[in-house]
Image (spheres, grey):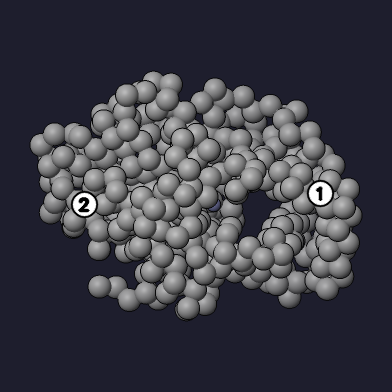
């Protein structure tokens, strides 16, 4: 068994290499398993990789495991996938179960340690059943846009933190924390250099994944989808974030999975999003395959925590990193500080964090696979 530290890859390339190396192991159980790639149109050295196999006898259900929709989060996502493949995949029944493992939905973001893709698009704002990338959507974002996306070089970190705190205080006082977070996180389709930008049209990454989800729902009666993310929720307790489109309550799922923290992606429990990938799968199921069974969820490995400190820190870190990316920083030190803060938000370095994250993931794998009848 791989030790916890070495589960976490350090580069996009090494992670992808390891992923491709799973194929023979998977073929021991699913002889028809094959490795597929989608090369990005602008750079064929960047690929979305997946390993798919139908069930060996009868396609009843499929396990879908996705990582790196937010590129930089794939370092943790790939670690969790490795643990899954070593410890849980062998318990599945290949005769009735198909598998689909996806490495790096957003390969550019993983390689470049950013959340969005090459065009600064947050892919989790692009999964729409009826795609319209409406530039007028979420008008409240305009009120906070200058605060979120300053159009100048990142200067002194201490000074910028003060400006940030002052700006945050002002906006929260004017709008309330709830409305501020709503406007911030919902998604926007007009500021190309802004946070939570959803683009002008459907990105190629999104199209690639949509085809895979359609295939899964078409060929199987039951779909179980686990999607890996980092950044939100308590630091030492991974949150299972369910779609608001799932009718089950969070309490119900906590008992069902024997897992202590389940939330729904609504403004009350988590936050609302347009173009969410998990919502898309539910939407597809409800529209085209209403008789089929689905459970899809995001594993959200919290990093800065959900105390007031964490809630205040995560936008700060994202604002500084995004500003330095577009407008540069006054010197290398300030640039490195911005990058380091961002990395800690989505790919923490602490050994104890990694240990607990893996432990939580295992508990969730166990509970979900059992409850959904996969083991
Ligand atoms: Zn994410």
Residue 339 appears in the rendering = no
Q: Is mark 1 within 8 Å of ligand 1?
A: no
Residue shown at 85%/42% (left/top)? 143
Q: In this view, does 364 lie to the left or right of 170?
A: left
Rendered location of residue 364, percent (x, y): 37, 58
Q: In this view, does 184 lie to the left or right of 228?
A: right
For mark 2, does the 10 Å Cα neighbourhood hold few (<14), some (14 to 19), or many (20 or more) residues?
Answer: some
Residue 274 falls in which quadrant of the image? top right
For mark 1, does the 10 Å Cα neighbourhood hold few (<14), some (14 to 19), or many (20 or more) residues?
Answer: few
Looking at the image, tell me whether mark 2 or mark 1 is earlier in sequence order. 1
Rendered location of residue 72, percent (x, y): 53, 58
Closest to the observer: 166 or 120?
166
- Asked if residue 136 is positioned above or below residue 21 in the image, the reply reads above
Q: Mark 1 points at which residue?
A: 176
Q: Name the residue under label 2.
A: 375
Residue 306 appears in the rendering = yes
Rendered location of residue 302, percent (x, y): 55, 62
Closest to the observer: 58 or 115?
58
- Asked if residue 334 is positioned above or below residue 373 in the image, the reply reads below
């Amino acid at each position: 068994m791989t030790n916890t530290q070495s589960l976490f890859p350090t580069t996009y390339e090494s992670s992808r290499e390891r992923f491709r190396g799973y194929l023979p192991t998977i073929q021991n159980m699913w002889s028809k398993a094959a490795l597929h790639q989608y090369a990005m149109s602008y750079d064929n050295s960047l690929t979305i990789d997946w390993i798919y196999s139908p069930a060996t006898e009868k396609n009843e259900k499929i396990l879908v495991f996705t990582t790196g929709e937010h590129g930089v989060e794939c370092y943790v996502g790939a670690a969790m996938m490795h643990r899954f493949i070593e410890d849980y995949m062998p318990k599945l029944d290949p005769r009735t179960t198909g598998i689909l493992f996806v490495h790096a939905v957003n390969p550019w973001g993983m390689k470049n340690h950013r959340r969005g893709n090459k065009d600064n698009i947050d892919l989790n704002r692009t999964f729409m059943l009826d795609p319209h990338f409406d530039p007028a959507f979420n008008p409240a974002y305009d009120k906070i846009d200058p605060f979120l996306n300053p159009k100048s070089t990142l200067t002194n970190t201490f000074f910028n933190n003060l400006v940030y705190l002052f700006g945050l205080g002002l906006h929260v006082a004017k709008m309330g924390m709830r409305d501020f977070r709503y406007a911030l996180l919902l998604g926007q389709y007009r500021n190309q250099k802004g946070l939570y930008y959803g683009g002008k049209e459907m990105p190629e990454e999104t199209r690639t994944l949509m085809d895979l989800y359609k295939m899964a729902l078409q060929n199987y009666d039951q779909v179980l989808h686990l999607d890996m993310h980092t950044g939100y929720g308590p630091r030492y307790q991974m949150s299972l974030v369910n779609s608001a489109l799932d009718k089950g309550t969070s309490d119900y799922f906590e008992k069902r999975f024997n897992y202590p923290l389940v939330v729904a992606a609504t403004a009350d429990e988590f936050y609302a999003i347009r173009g969410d990938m998990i919502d898309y799968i539910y939407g597809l199921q409800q529209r085209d395959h209403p008789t089929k069974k689905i459970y899809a969820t995001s594993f959200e490995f919290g990093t800065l925590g959900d105390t007031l400190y964490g809630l205040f820190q995560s936008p700060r870190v994202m604002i500084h990193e995004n500003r330095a990316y577009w407008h540069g920083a006054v010197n290398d030190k300030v640039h490195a500080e911005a990058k380091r803060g961002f990395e800690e938000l989505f790919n923490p370095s602490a050994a104890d964090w990694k240990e607990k994250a893996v432990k939580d993931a295992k508990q969730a794998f166990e509970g979900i696979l059992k409850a959904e009848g996969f083991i």
